[in-house]
Image (spheres, rainbow, N blue to C red):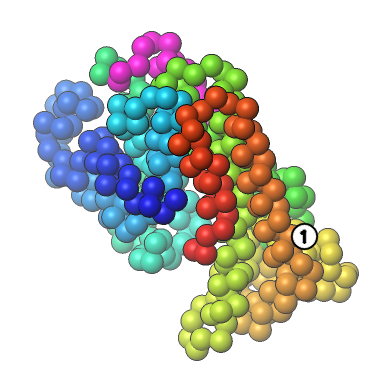
Amino acid sequence: MRDVLAAWRPAIDEAIEAVLPREVDEDYLEAFFGAPTFAYDADAIQAGLADPVWDLLDRGGKRWRSVLFLVLVDAFGAEPEDHLRYAAVPEILHTGTIIVDDVEDEAELRRGEPALHRVYGQDVALNAGNALYFVPLKLIGGPDSGLDAERQLAAYRMLTYELNRTHLGQGMDIDWHNRRRSEVSEAEYLEMCACKTGCLARITARLAAIVTDQPESVERAVATYAERMSVGFQIIDDVLDVEHSLGEAGDFGKAFGNDIREGKTTLMVIHALTQAGPERAERLQAILADPDPDDEDVLAAIDVIQDTGAVEYSRERAITLADEARAAIEPLDLAPGPAETLAEFPGFMIEREQ
């Protein structure tokens, strides 16, 4: 899978650059956004949009959603290169969501460097992040989209539905974080993940089905596949924070337990609260509710999570979701080579170490 991701990344970045160039000029602005009423300021748009977005994109990222799109197109029997432009859509949308997410979380870092709002200011970051929700629409509509009117409408409807649900998930997560609320059911947590993380993956899969003109039954199946896989991905993200914290706790001066310090509601926390005795559960809730827990408190919280088997439980839940993802597409008539890649994708996503 790493080879597949690495092989497609340069082409995906070229597709993104075709939508949002590294260097913005007046010719691009007029061709992409239409003639100005009076005059564009290309330098201002460069500084306020292109520079921060490419700053973040150049820091890394797996581009797995875009690669998933291309593998699905291939599995449907179409040529991935013929649909490469649409592979930019999920990565652009994902980039927009994490820019806004970092502002909302008051995050310090993103991909090992200061979050964009720390570098360019909240106003620039929010505008750039919000713009990336709309820029991909230019790839879907218009005479140069390569899609007939029916598929354009289907893509617009799909994006509206999924992006709305994305914000529902983010709203749930923000409320839990702001109130440092840990009394959340497992079903509510999984729904938050299905909306916040799953909807971007669903966009990826559904768009691949739409642009290749697949029947609705196939679109539903691949949407389920992508959603289950991405929820498992989110669960493992939370697990890795705890596991990495155990390795970092003994390193002098090194921060650890970020999710616990933030009072983040995770599947591990939910499971631990149901399995720990009343006294330890109350202690864990108190630590999560504390806006500034010390290192000893963080280690105490990790102890409760470990002792209740919450890490193992969460990993098993992610494995089950990966199995459900594979089962969703098993009945489909897919090209053998890319079908094997799709079968490997969920395992790769949940077995990673970073």
Q: Residues within 10 Å of mark 1 (few under 14, many from 20)?
A: some
Q: Position of residue 94 (x, y in %)?
A: 43, 44
Is 191 rendered above or below residue 210? Answer: below
Q: Give whichever of 258, 290 is nearer the camera.
A: 258
Residue lying farthest to the right in this orientation: 278
- Residue depicted at 39% across the width and 35% down the height: 70
Question: How many marks on residues?
Answer: 1
Q: Position of residue 212 (x, y in %)?
A: 42, 21
Instruction: Answer yes or no: is residue 90 visible.
Output: no
Q: Position of residue 37 (x, y in %)?
A: 17, 23
Whether the magenta-drawn stretch holds residue 309 is answered as no
Is 216 rendered above or below residue 324? Answer: above
Where disc 1 sits, the SS reads: helix
Determine the image quadrant of residue 241: bottom right
In this rendering, would 287 be left or right of 99?
right
Q: Give whichever of 95, 223 is nearer the camera.
A: 223
Q: Magenta part of the protein: which range?
A: 145-163
Is 90 rendered above or below residue 312? Answer: above
- Residue depicted at 41% across the width and 54% down the height: 2
- Residue depicted at 34% across the width and 19% down the height: 141
- Residue depicted at 43% across the width and 11% down the height: 150
Residue lying farthest to the bottom in this orientation: 252
The residue at which mark 1 appears reads as 271
Whether the magenta-drawn stretch holds residue 152 is answered as yes
Dominant SS of magenta comes to helix
Three-letter residue code for mark 1: His
